[in-house]
Image: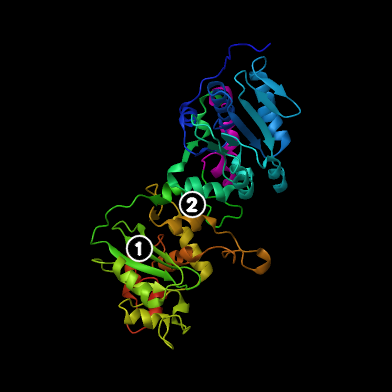
Amino acid sequence: MPKKELKLEGIPNEKQILFFESRASHTAYGGARGGGKSWAARRKLVLCSSRYPQLRSLLLRRTFPELEANHIMPLRAELDGFAKYSTEKRMFTFPNRSIIKLGYCDTEADVFQYQGQEYEIIVFEEATQFTPFQMQYIATCNRTTRTDFKPRIYYTCNPGGPGHDYIKRLFIDRRFTEDENPDDYRFIPARVTDNTALMEADPQYIKTLKALPEHLRKGYLDGEWDIVDGQFFSEFQRRLHVIEPFHIPPEWKKFRAMDWGYNDPCCVLWFAVAPDRRVYVYQEYYKRQRLARDVARSIREMSLFEDHAYTVASPDAWQKRGNSGIEGESIAETFLLNGVPLIPADNSRVIGWQRCHENLAIAPDGLPYVQIFSNCENLIRTLPLLTYGKISTNKHEDVADNCEDHAPEAFRYGLMSRPSPAITPTQQQARILAFDPFSKPRDRVLSGGFFSI
């Protein structure tokens, strides 16, 4: 006979309380290993099932062994004598007729077993291990006709896995389609240090996370989402490299860099150099299928009341392709006629990417040599997604060909127009004094000193 009282053990930490309180349509919780995600997911379902009669919940893991070890066994122990468990249906039934169904999706086809079912709550445990298709398809089951409970989906997650980009887009980058309402999505970050119970019971666990390889350590310990296998810029850390916009003093030197594209996005970045030589990327233009004259006009409009020393552009802007707006006129010529003169960028790829590494490195004051304003969304999104080219193609020091690299290319062009951050002001001045004033503009850029600001 079921007991009439449910006794739950354990005290939630502050992040778990936020998770319990969230009533958003979509709530993601976690970001690092050891944040107490599995316990929070189970407890959330038990609390809701106890409070709301006839509530239907679905808890999912990617594989059955994970489901059994992480949820079926703990729930059977916790709910023993209170909620009835059906081994055949993998389902707990509460005295108030609420149910918690436990399932898994080992393959893409496994989602079809949930077709036509209806759940007020769905929990994707370790959500990044599911594919986007699995999450989107099963989300169609999240509906109800009752008026006392709003349907919602919870995602517990760590960086990495087949669903990484999908979860990152929604909850970290917050890039939504026109059918997605930003107000419906909430992210609650949690790390091992937030899990006071684990830290007290197993203080050695944090040492285990610190001993992991760099890309795993960044994800599992620090909760960094800007990680991918074979990551080209593994030093990129959003918390250090991305900052909120601030007013740039008019006396700071400014310049621009462009990676031209028509069918591919055309990206323009605005740079400013502080007196301490730290570089800030403070504005971004990122559009496709725009004529050169329209891009130039947009650049002028976005640069009102600012003086820019120069604008470097990808060398292909000097080719005559016919999409400048005037037949037989190069992109660079069209830009010049529309008030934005261009200078050919140094397109030395390996050296250029190395210059990016140097600027992303940490300066003696503990901050990177280059920082990016948070409004430069496409640079922030694509820079950490770059991966190494294949060793077999002799491009292992270059970015892979299949990356979305338009904003990083403009980033590279801009930084290549400046000296390395390792060069001292005295060395920089010596380069300027040694510059030949009669050299061609391209030589001036390649000299790494004439345009040093």
Say if residue 384 shows up in the picture. yes
- Amino acid at circle 2: Asp
Q: Give the range drawn in magenta.
A: 199-223
Image quadrant for the N terminus?
Answer: top right
| As drawn, 10 above or below 104 | above
Q: Which of 398 and 122 is in front in this view?
A: 122
Judged by its main secondary structure, the magenta piece is helix
Q: How crowded is mark 2: few (under 14 residues within 10 Å), some or many (20 or more)?
A: few
Residue 431 position in % (x across, y down)? 35, 71
- For disc 1, the marked residue is 271
Which label was assigned to residue 179?
Answer: 2
The colour style of the image is: rainbow
Image quadrant for the C terminus?
Answer: bottom left
Q: Which of 427 and 70 is in front in this view?
A: 70
Q: Residue at x 56, y 23 (%)?
A: 53
Is residue 213 located in the magenta-colored stretch of the structure? yes
Is 108 on the left or on the right of 123, as rendered? right
State which quadrant residue 209 falls in: top right
Is 130 on the left or on the right of 23, as rendered? right
Q: Which residue is drawn at 28% across and 64% down?
A: 253
Residue 163 position in % (x across, y down)? 60, 47
